[in-house]
Amino acid sequence: MNTVTELHTHGGAADYRDHGLIFPRGFVFGSATASYQVEGAFDEDGRGPSIWDTFSKTPGKVWNGDTGDVACDHYHRQGADLDLMKELGLGAYRFSIAWPRIQPTGTGAVNQPGVDFYSRLVDGLLERGIRPVATLYHWDLPQALEDAGGWPARGTADAFEEYAAIMGRALGDRVHTWTTLNEPWCSAYLGYGQGGHAPGRHEPAAALAAVHHLNLAHGRGLQALRATSAGDPEYSVTLNFHVLRTDGPGNDDAIRRIDGLANRVFTHPMLRGEYPADVIADTAAVTDWEFVKDGDLDAVCQPIDVLGVNYYSTATVRLWDGTSPRQQNDGHKGASDGTAWPGSHELVEFVEQPGPFTAMGWNIAPDGLENLLMSLHEQFPHQPLMVTENGAAFDDVVAADGSVPDADRIDYLRRHFTAAHRALSRGVDLRGYFVWSLLDNFEWGYGYAKRFGIVRVDFDTLERAVKDSGRWYSRLATTGVLPE
Ligand code: GCO
C-alpha cells in the first residue's frame, strides 16, 4: 500500500494531531544523545577537559551549578543503555564522540581507551541491529584548543581534520552514518557572540570567523572521513534551522537577515560552495571575512548523503523601529538579545509567539517542521533529508507506580511526526527521524532542570524508567504506523 497518498484521509488540514499514518518502508526511527550530555566520567580513562567542563564549573553559567561530571553515567552503563535501545526497538542511535576522550588536548597522540569506548558502543549497536549514527562534534571542544584560540582560529579546523581521520580509521569500517558537526550555529553564535554557551565569549567578529572555521572543519573533516573509512558509510552534517515568521507587513528584510545568518551562511557554502552576498554585506561593519582563504569554499562544499535537520520551534521577527523597547522573545536557545546576530544587532526584534509552549518556553508549531522540510526540498531538490532532532521538554510527574505518564510529550511527537508525514506526501525525500532525546540529560545552560527524554533518568540514583512517550515511540518504531 502506498501509505503516503493516504495522508489526506486522516485529520483536518490545520490539525496535526493524527494517527494511523503509515511511514514508508525503510524509514528510520531513531533517538539521539550527545557525549557531554549523557556520558559523565569526565576525568576517566585519559579524557581531557573540554570547554563545557570549564564553562559549567564557572559560577553563574549553568542553572544550579550543574555540570556533566556524572550526567547519566552512560559511560559506565553502556551495556544497559544499549539493551534499553533494543527493548524500545530503535532502528538507529545518534550519539556523539567526545573529542577530548580521543585526543585529550585536541591534537597529537590518540588516547586508546577513549577510542575503545566508542568502538564497543558501535559493536553493541550492530549486535542489536541498531544503526550507529556518529557525530564528531557536539560542542565539547578540547579546552587546549580553545586556549589556542578556539573556533575563531583556523588551527581548530586543521585539528578537526586530523581528529576526523583518526575516527575514520577507528570506526569507519562499522559506522552507518558519519555526521561532522551538530548545530554549528550554536557553536559559533552562542559560544562566541552571545556567550550563553561555552566558551562564553562575546565577540561578534570572532563568531563569524567561527562560522567559517566550522564550515571548513565540516568540509575537510568529511574528506578525511571519506579517505579513511574502510566501510561504506553515509556522510552528513546536522544544522538547526531557524523557521522564521513575521507578524505584519514590511518585515521581509528582518526575515532575510536572520535567515542569512542562521541558515544560509551554512547551507550555501556547504551545498553550493559560496557565501551569500547579502550576509557578507550585512556584516561588513563587523568583519571583512579575510579569514576565507583561496580554496576554502571548494573544501567546504562536499557532497553529503543526508542533510540532518534539527527542529523544535519557530521564531517571529520584525524590523525594530529603534525606539520602543526591543523585544527579545526568541525563546529557542535564548539567543535573541542581538549579540547572537552580528551585523543585524539592533535592527531586528524577536516578538512574542503564539503558544502553546513546552517547558523550555518554545512554541509548539508542527507546521513549522512541514514548512522547513518543504523549503529545504525546494532549495536543494536532490538532497535527501533526515530529522536528526525533534522533541520536547516538559515537567514530567512520576506516578505512584513509578510510571511517567507524559501525554504532553506524546502529543508533541504525534503532531511533529504528522508534519513529517505530510512533507513525505508532498514529495520530500525524508529518510528518517531521531527523537531528542533517548534519556533525560544535561541540557546545557539549563543543567538537569529540563527533561527531554523518552526515558526518565533519576539523577539521584541514575535509574532509568521508560516514559509513556518511550512506549508510544516504541510502537511507532517497530510498526512504522503512527499509534493512537
Ligand atoms: C541542540 C542540541 C541538543 C539539545 C537539544 C535541546 O540542539 O541544542 O543538539 O544537545 O539538548 O536541542 O535543546
Image: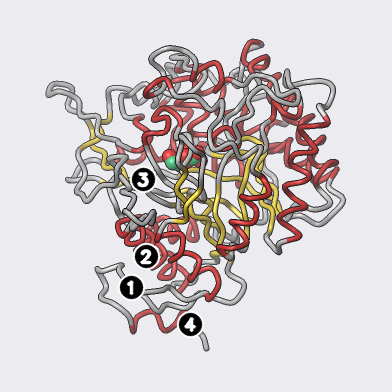
Residue that carries the numbered disc 1 in the rendered image:
18
Residue that carries the numbered disc 4 in the rendered image:
3
Q: Going 56% across and 58% down the picture, which residue do you hit? A: 30
246 lies above or below 51: below
- Mark 3: C-beta under 8 Å from nearest atom of ligand 1: yes
Distance between mark 4 and mark 1 Cα atoms: 14 Å
Q: Using the image, tell me which numbered label, if any, was put on residue 393.
A: 3
Q: Residues within 10 Å of mark 3 (few under 14, many from 20)?
A: many
In x, y percent, where is residue 432? 56, 62
Badges 3 and 2: C-beta atoms under 8 Å apart?
A: no
Badges 1 and 2: C-beta atoms under 8 Å apart?
A: yes
In x, y percent, where is residue 308? 56, 51
Q: Amino acid at mark 4?
A: Thr
Q: Going 58% across and 69% down the picture, which residue do you hit? A: 27
Q: Amino acid at mark 1?
A: Asp
Left or right of 428 on screen, residue 43: right
Q: Secondary structure at mark 4?
A: loop
Mark nearer the N terminus (3 vs 2): 3
Q: Secondary structure at mark 3?
A: loop
Mark nearer the N terminus (3 vs 1): 1
Of all residues shown, which one is farthest toward the bottom? 1
Mark nearer the N terminus (4 vs 1): 4
Specify the quadrant of the image occupied by residue 341: top left
Residue that carries the numbered disc 2 in the rendered image:
414
Q: Does residue 287 appear anywhere in the picture? A: no
Distance between mark 4 and mark 2 Cα atoms: 17 Å
Q: Secondary structure at mark 2?
A: helix
Distance between mark 4 and mark 3 Cα atoms: 30 Å
Distance between mark 1 and mark 2 Cα atoms: 7 Å
* 126 or 271: nearer the viewer: 126
Q: Going 40% across and 79% down the picture, which residue do you hit? A: 20
